[in-house]
Amino acid sequence: MARVKPVKVGLVGCGAISKAYLRNMTQKFSILDVVGCSDIIPERSKNRAEEFGIQQLTNEQIFQDPNIEIVVNTTYPLAHYEVTKAALLAGKHVYSEKMMAVTMDEARELVSIAKEKGLRIGMAPDTFLGGGLQTARKIIDSGLIGEPLTAVAMVIRGYHMRGEKETERMPFVMSPGGGIPFDMGGYYLHALIHLLGGIKRVMGFAKTREKEYIYENPRHPRYKESFKYDTPNMLVGVLEFEQGCYGTLTTVSEAFGETPRLEIYGTEGILICNDPNTFGGPIYLKRNNGSWNEFPPYEIPLTHGYTDESRGLGVADMAWAIRNNRPHRCSMEMGFHAFEVIHGIIESCNTGKVYEMTSKCERPAPLPSGYISGTYAEACLDN
């Protein structure tokens, strides 16, 4: 049997995250053939192209190339809608960094265009495809924690302008569509949907703690200048899953350090998951078979591969899905559903009412276990 024909890819947006994508897409996955990259700043795309041995292109060249099937959109959040729409209208499938757009109307339009043209949208994050959260899914599906009752998801970070250079704090995380609920919320929501399924209703609170901040480092060229923080930086939401489980989602960027937490509590056990921003473990399981002190949580050996930094795994899964005519796991429905959850919590805060979700989302199919290491690990995507 002949080797599967690789899917040609063009990347738009050569900022910080593009390096991880291009490294993995050019080196880790045989199904992907990266043709070239583009950026609004030509020097950046030139540097990335030289770094990975691909072509420096313009957006228009990527959109007009009849051989390119997938456009990977790693622009900043305010440009996601514009770039994704242009790619869809050019007849390309799109895989986008989180989240889909800035407003719900923009997201609905992108979904409508994709459906009308029979095209796919894939949505980051793809960390739930890694060995950590795939192992967690296997534990839940095996019944080792019984019926899931409640989930706790929390990320606490510090987004401050304390660096010396303009580039040391990405400005998009302080702009509409880029605050911590959108920047980090997707990792936790994709993990929760992967583990527990779709969400029925949400409610909660969200706010921008301070609307004006200053550059704090004396070495920064804009030291003591102020800037607007135009996005929620504190959000606490309550989630009701379709299958009956309850959960909480907390995202805050006003503290310091980082506290990632994802735990699922069931009738027969507790599952402590890895940081949803990573692909690997550790995963801990506490079974209802004795006192807490007698039986502490046990670290579970991972049952799946892709435990290292594997951004682009979702693009590879999407490419295999195109060749095998199956649904891709980082689906448009999942991305839209997670996006609506964040907007629903914000709307609930504004109205004081429970927000009823309008979108539906099934759990993506789990990856088969095994294929732990080596280049043959990619075989888990060919199904």
Image (tube, rainbow, N blue to C red):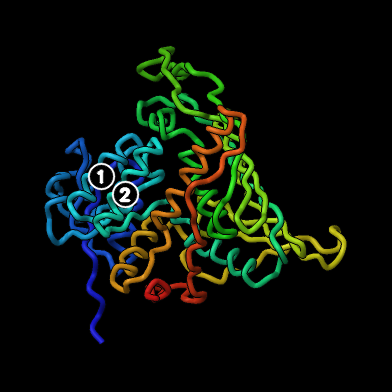
- Disc number for residue 94: none
| Local secondary structure at mark 1 | helix
2 or 1: tag closer to the N-terminus: 1
- Compared with 73, 209 (above or below) is above
Q: Is residue 50 left or right of residue 311?
A: left
Q: Residue at x 52, y 62 (%)?
A: 363
Where residue 338 sits in the image (x, y, percent)? 48, 47
Residue linked to disc 2: 112
Q: Mark 2 packing: few (<14 Cα in 10 Å), some, or many (20+)?
A: few
To which quarter of the image does residue 102 belong?
top left
Q: Is residue 338 above or below residue 353?
A: below
Q: Secondary structure at mark 2?
A: helix
Classed neighbour count for the residue bearing mark 1: other residues with Cα under 10 Å, few (<14), some (14–19), many (≥20)? many
What kind of residue is marked 2?
A: Ser
Residue that badge 1 annotates: 85
Query: How far across and down, in percent of the image, does residue 103 sit?
Result: 39, 35
Measuring from the top left, give residue 279's x and y in whole percent.
Answer: 50, 58
- Please say if 268 is above or below 5: above
Q: Nearer the viewer, residue 201 or 83?
A: 201
For badge 1, the amino acid type reads: Lys
Quarter occupied by the N terminus: bottom left
* 325 or 257: nearer the viewer: 325
Image point (52%, 65%), residue name:
131
Rendered-image quadrant of the C terminus: bottom left
